[in-house]
Image (cartoon, grey):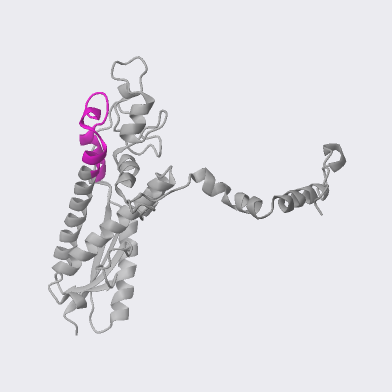
Amino acid sequence: MSDRELLLVALGPVQDFIATARRCQDLWFGSQLLSELSRVAAETVRSKGGVPVEDTLIFPPNVDQRDMAVANKILARVPIGQGRAIAEATQKAVQGHLMERAEAIFDEEIPSRAEGPRGFDREAALSHLKDLIEFFWVAVPEGGSYPTARAQAEGLLARRKLSRDWPQAAFNDTGWVKSSLDGARPSVIHEDAYDDKSPNRLTPDELYEWFKIKGKERLCGVALLKRLGFLEEEGGQDQDGEAERPVFHSTSHVAALPVLTRLASGPQGVLGDYIQALRQGAHINVNRLRIRDVGLA
């Protein structure tokens, strides 16, 4: 009989990050942040395992490669009876890292004059992040069969994910306009900032410079973190050796990419296909459209 148990941890929410990403860069940073938190979880499990580190983590097998993304599921072999303590310590470490990351991003990107009655409500934004991370875990004695224990752990985790927690929200949204992305949380930018008649009104340039907001867009603390967090990330280097951020196209560009690709490869061929489709239409009189396909063989 083994003196170990399998600890299986899953972090989320994956779908929430996708649903509340209006821009490609928001979605990218949300994915980066979830991977970063998963790395913190894996490193904590490894350090708290109480056994040689090389014998603890099963997946991911190696978290020392900093350029490698980490999936949101961690599987480890830990001393039997220690699963709960290690899982709780891991959850605390993940939440602590998220709050520290958010504080650092807000400090770096939002000027002090942008906070207060005419702008950013930091306390509200941080309260939105307190219940953001979904942290599920199960621990199963390994016994004499790893495959059996693994299958049991996966089944228990699937059931645990279906058993939702419904705690009271950590924030008070009374009197606040909801986020325009999903309506789940209130905006963390005071409404006076959008009111043309208010002395605390912010100009469109100020809204974009301070919060990367365009128009009347409202953002909750989670959405604002993703919007500003992108600015903290560095990509490669330009021709002068300076760090540059990743480049993202708009969601409209991504949606139109198949059409743009076809046009770039041969616009006349695309137009010829369109004309042929019109000619084959059962209810379309092509002659009345006065289409001339000169040069479109």
- Of residues 53 and 4, the one nearer the viewer is 53
- Of residues 32 and 42, the one nearer the viewer is 32
Residue 87 appears in which quarter of the rendering? bottom left
- Of residues 187 and 242, the one nearer the viewer is 242
**Residue 8: % across, % down:** 27, 67
Please say whether residue 159 is visible from this viewpoint: yes
Could you tell whether 107 is left or right of 213 in the image?
A: left
Q: Main secondary structure of the magenta part?
A: helix
- The residue at the point 32 percent across, 20 percent down is 201
Residue 124 is covered by the magenta coloring: yes
Could you tell whether 216 is left or right of 73 in the image?
A: right
- The residue at the point 28 percent across, 76 percent down is 149
Residue 183 is covered by the magenta coloring: no
Range shown magenta: 105-129
Q: Is residue 39 above or below residue 212?
A: below
Which quadrant is home to the C terminus?
bottom right
User: How many labels, in total?
Assistant: 0
